[in-house]
Image (cartoon, rainbow, N blue to C red):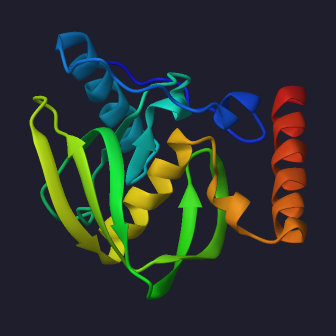
Amino acid sequence: MAIRPILTAPDPRLKTISKPVERVDDALRALMDDMLDTMYDAPGIGLAAIQIGVPQRVIVMDLAGKDEEKQPRFFVNPEILWRSEDLSFYEEGCLSVPEMYEDVQRPARIRARWLDYHGQEVEMEADGMLATCLQHEMDHLEGVLFIDHLSKLKRDIILRKMTKAKKRAAVG
């Protein structure tokens, strides 16, 4: 298992639409293990494969609190089957947009289907943080960042800050 570099905005690879996974095998499980290690190291609560430069429809997530036992979740080829009409706001952040947080409005509840770590199909209804995080990570699979849900002005300000921070880091 390895910790991989996380792509940060405005890296154009983050706008890539991820391809469906053909099958869940040992190579894919190794990728998911690397993703989980990378997410924990960052630290974060969710990570899509495209965020480490792999354009496959794979997500890892762990919503356990700091003092709770880890509860890793794996989502292969996730799809949303239903979205509630009622909406909720959550302050979102992203490992690909570090240290930037904004309120994003999304459906409060969803029903989703995916394959798990072993290739078994799972379907469930989710609300709260799970629904928000799953929608956020699934957006990555479509080349969408949480800042794309903001006004153009807010998005442009965040991207300018990200570009300046990258330039400062490159200079040393």
- Relative placement, left or right, of 22 versus 156 is left
Please provide percent x and percent y for residue 56. 44, 26
Residue depicted at 38% across the width and 79% down the height: 84
Q: Which image quadrant: the C terminus?
A: top right
Direction top: furthest residue: 27
Q: Nearer the viewer, residue 154 or 124?
A: 124
Residue depicted at 68% across the width and 28% down the height: 13
115 is higher (above) or lower (below) than 43: above
127 is higher (above) or lower (below) than 136: below
Q: Nearer the viewer, residue 160 or 144?
A: 144
Residue depicted at 47% across the width and 25% down the height: 19
Q: Which image quadrant: the N terminus?
A: top left
Direction front: furthest residue: 81
84 is higher (above) or lower (below) than 37: below
Q: Nearer the viewer, residue 34 or 43?
A: 34
Residue depicted at 46% across the width and 43% down the height: 42
- Relative placement, left or right, of 33 versus 129 is left
Picture quarter containing residue 96?
top right
Picture quarter containing residue 85?
bottom left
- Relative placement, left or right, of 118 versus 20 is left
Q: Nearer the viewer, residue 160 or 111?
A: 111
97 is higher (above) or lower (below) than 167: below
Direction bottom: furthest residue: 86
- Relative placement, left or right, of 149 versus 93 is right
Please provide percent x and percent y for residue 115. 19, 38
Please provide percent x and percent y for residue 129. 35, 72
